[in-house]
Image (tube, helix red, strand yellow):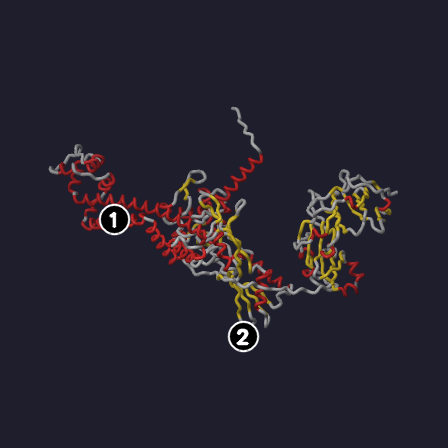
Amino acid sequence: MSEKILRTEYSEEMQKSYLDYSMSVITSRAIPDARDGLKPVQRRVLYDMSELHLDHDKPHRKSARIVGDTMGKYHPHGDSSIYETLVVLSQDFKKGMALVDGHGNFGSIEGDGAAAMRYTEARLKKFAEEVYLKDLDKTVDFVSNYDETEKEPEVLPVRVPNLLVNGAEGIAVGMSTSIPTHNLGEVIDAVKAYIDNRLLTVEELMEYMPGPDFPTGGIIANKSDLLQIYETGTGKIKLRGKIEVELGRRKADRDKLVITEIPYTMIGAGINKLLVDIADLVETRKLTDVVDISNQSNKEGIRIVLELKKDADVNKIKAILYKKTKLEDTYGVNMLAIDEGRPETMNLKQILNTFLEFQYRNMTKKYNVLLEKELEKKEVQEGLIEACDVIDLIIAVLRGSKNMKDAKECLMTGNTEKIRFRVPGFEEDAKNLHFTERQATAILEMRLYKLIGLEILALQKSYKETLRKIREYQHILSNQKNMDVVIKEDLDAIKAEFAEPRRTLIEDGEEMVYVEAKEAAKEGIFVMDRFGYCKLLDKSTYERNQETVDTEQVHVLRCLNTDKICLFTSAGVLHQIKALDIPSGKLRDKGVPIENLSKYDGRNETICLLTTARELKGRILLFATRLAMVKQVPGEEFETNNRMVAATKLQEEDSVVSVTMINGETDVVLQTTNGTFLRFPLEEISVLKKASRGVRGIRLAKNEELETVYLIGENPIIDYKGKEVHLNRLKLAKRDGKGSKVRLN
């Protein structure tokens, strides 16, 4: 069999494949559908729980069963993503309205993870059951699952704008969505207002739904920016935690600042980070009025207590907390959703309009299905009522029939050829029978007790109810206004049963002003011993004990308390430590490990140069590596606030041998492990950026490495294996040469 090879441009094929992959991630995983506000995995979990009949009034079922069933039938992308979805749907501190009732450890607001799925159980919340899954079989379309062995709903018939109520978070390929949660009652009010008047502006709709309502409460401090966010679908919300003042009940009691609500962005490890940040502020004496910090939070809510000194400036403390911690944070809004199969950033009116169009389609399909059922029921009821009036005739037909087929044909067409009537007079009446097939089937299946007088009355009553429902359904389907009334009544019922009070305060909060007092520059001595323990010594202490300090300490560096200590290491990394963060100590104090103050790892890297940030300004640094790569880098390249930054680019298995400050030298000498020396002008080494690899300084032989770098200064004499070597007597060559060996005899 001959193969047909298709030739194509590699870049074009990659581009097409990447676009296909990105759209798959966008539409099938990460971005919610604008109609029901759910991602595929969320929709599948809820539908599977419905199929397992895990209703709110039924016993909980093992989470592992739900996850396994969902993965096997609908979502073959791994159990971790499914269980994570199940957990999030149950967390009332993440969702505006939780949809799953979890039993067991489903995590906490402080970042504790959920227990393994074999230990937890779950079932649907009543809200999910009533609002998200009701009338599933009458409304939405079903599509084949991944292997076409099952059917799953294309969307869920959600009866509230879930995109707003529960929000959404998702990162796809090339785009992301971030939609805040809103108050259910306010969202319903906005929908009803929009139904009544489609010409309402976004600003007018915000009278009903003023802004997001986060489950963690807190304060939205930029109310004036919300209008633009809802008009464009993008923007930033400034969130603040809520701080209350508790005055001491007795004279001896301290006043307290109590954090009772946190920004939504702090969910998880943010609370512990807040405690650490406050403790750091206290230790660095920026919060001098705080004497104690305690986390008294429990399942009832957040309670972080700061005990204050007497006559503490509460406003100043609040300003510091908002400015220096995550107690004030921003929430980026990007209301991106899948609309008509395409990702689109939607404003408030577009979201409401999409939701209503979805409701109209669902209700049209629902009431057409209900109408069809009632019409079928009406047909059967009319047949049974008519049959009760001629029951003797029907009995005569049944007694004279040989089989069910002949009896049914007679009831439908009046054909009496195959019927033997035992009592004369019925044959002519039987010829006038004209029941429909459905009526004939119902008559044949009717039980005799239905002929009781009361049962006949009940049948007539049921017939009247059926006629009423038919008129009702036809009335609803006749025009959109009638459908609007039904939608509004439905929304009112949902609001009455499930709506909760608003939790998040919305205001235009004052900008917190905190001017950090600049500490006066003071000279100190940074010292570090061979074990990596460091401290700051007072200048006078050092001068009194200079000889001892210089002898016992490996690194001794003069610095200002406003400066930074810079460590260039063999790993090609610059570590920076604020001098203020280094503890001051006495002469015999041990100090603290340098690893505790920075990301420096003494086991895997060594210090090549230790200096201050002030010293780096206006200077040139010479870098050299084991594989003989060299470069010059201006000190300004390392002006950064980052605690750790890449100082040079290294090849695999390479490391930095030397980092040296140039002080007017003109020549450089490279020495290898084999005793080869190469002297050449410093100007031959290029001045490059810190991110560059450099140029080759010397040609290395096999198994040879660069060992030492010398800058020829005033005294260019070194000791090499017991012999004096005059560096300035070495032959001046070119960079990237082989060099020459020094005679040791």
Q: Do the residues under discs 2 and 1 have CB atoms within 8 angstroms? A: no
Residue 205, image quadrant: bottom left
Task: Give above or below for 122 relative to 743.
Answer: below
Split into 4 quadrants, where in the image is the C terminus? top right
Residue 307, image quadrant: bottom right
Can the viewer see residue 304 in this picture?
Answer: yes
Marks 2/1: CA–CA distance:
75 Å
For this view, does 136 lie left or right of residue 244? left
Q: Which residue lies furthest to the left in this view?
A: 424
Mark 2 vs mark 1: give the one in front.
1
Residue 200 placed where, x, y %?
Answer: 41, 55
| Residue under label 1 | 467
Residue 539 placed where, x, y %?
Answer: 76, 64
The residue lying toward the viewer, choosing from 8 and 37, is 8
Residue at x 79% of width, y 59% of height: 550
Residue 359 placed where, x, y %?
Answer: 38, 49
Can the viewer see residue 303 in this picture?
Answer: no
| Residue under label 2 | 250
Label 2 Cα crowd, 10 Å radius (few <14 / some 14-19 / many 20+):
few
Label 1 Cα crowd, 10 Å radius (few <14 / some 14-19 / many 20+):
some
The residue lying toward the viewer, choosing from 563 and 96, is 563
Query: Which element is circle 2 on?
Result: loop
For this view, does 723 lie left or right of residue 51? right
What type is the residue that disc 2 sits on?
Arg
